[in-house]
Amino acid sequence: MIQKLITKIARHLDKENIPYMLIGGQAVLLYGMVRLTEDIDITLGVDTDKLSLMKKLLKEIKLVIPKNIDDAFVKKTNVLVGLDKLTGIRIDFIFSFTPYEKQALKRARIVRLNNYNVSFASCDDTIIHKIFASRPRDLEDARILLKKNMKGLDIAYIKKWLREFSDIAGHNLVKELENIR
């Protein structure tokens, strides 16, 4: 059910030429870690100036925007929330426009899902996202992804971006990486 929803969303984003990549739990599943995830997180390669287009797209996909999510919330958080009434699945559409996110979108991995190409964050970028979030579950996800995918990872790339994000996070993310390795 969730794969059909992902494919449906991907088709609509592609139709509107909106770059995207799945991140979070869906990307973790892709890179070899079985875990329960009840939502879909999608980074969009557009800024909130495309909010009205995204709201139209959600309507086409038959996703409902919760009543407490208004334009002010979206512009403040850069997150547009959609709910699939049929399944109850929450989809977070994350507006992005930083140099890191632009680069991550270019590095995304294309995966064939339900006979359609869907864009997922690279394993390197999934690890960066997880370490930046730094919640216990995210750090455990990062640890397992590192262990399962070590041979194919670009550790220099991961460290570069973790160094960049350390000030924002308020702690040394490269040290966090070393601790979980």
Image: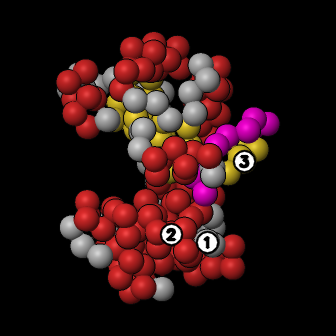
**Which of the marked residues, 2 or 3, is nearer the chain's N terminus?**
3
> Which amino acid type is shown beneath numbered disc 2?
Ile
| Residue 134: image location, x then y, percent | 32, 68
Q: Which residue is mark 2?
A: 158
Q: CA distance from mark 2 to mark 3?
A: 22 Å
Magenta stretch holds residue 6: no
Question: Which quadrant does the N terminus fall into?
Answer: top right
Q: Residue at x 50, y 50 (%)?
A: 23
Query: Which of the two discs, 1 and 3, labels the residue nearer the N terminus?
Result: 3
In the rendered image of this protein, does residue 96 appear above or below residue 72? below
Q: Eyeballing the image, is 44 above or below 151?
A: above
Q: Is residue 41 visible?
A: no
Q: Residue at x 51, y 60 (%)?
A: 126
The residue indicated by pointer 1 is 154
How did the renderer colour the structure? secondary structure
Q: Residue 116 lies in what quarter of the image?
A: top right
Question: Local crowd at mark 1 within 10 Å, few (<14), some, or many (≥20)?
Answer: few
CB atoms of marks 2 and 1 within 8 Å: yes
- Is 46 in front, or is 131? 46
Q: Which residues are magenta?
A: 114-122
Location of mark 3 (residue) = 111
In the rendered image, the vertical position of residue 51 relative to residue 180, given as above or below: above
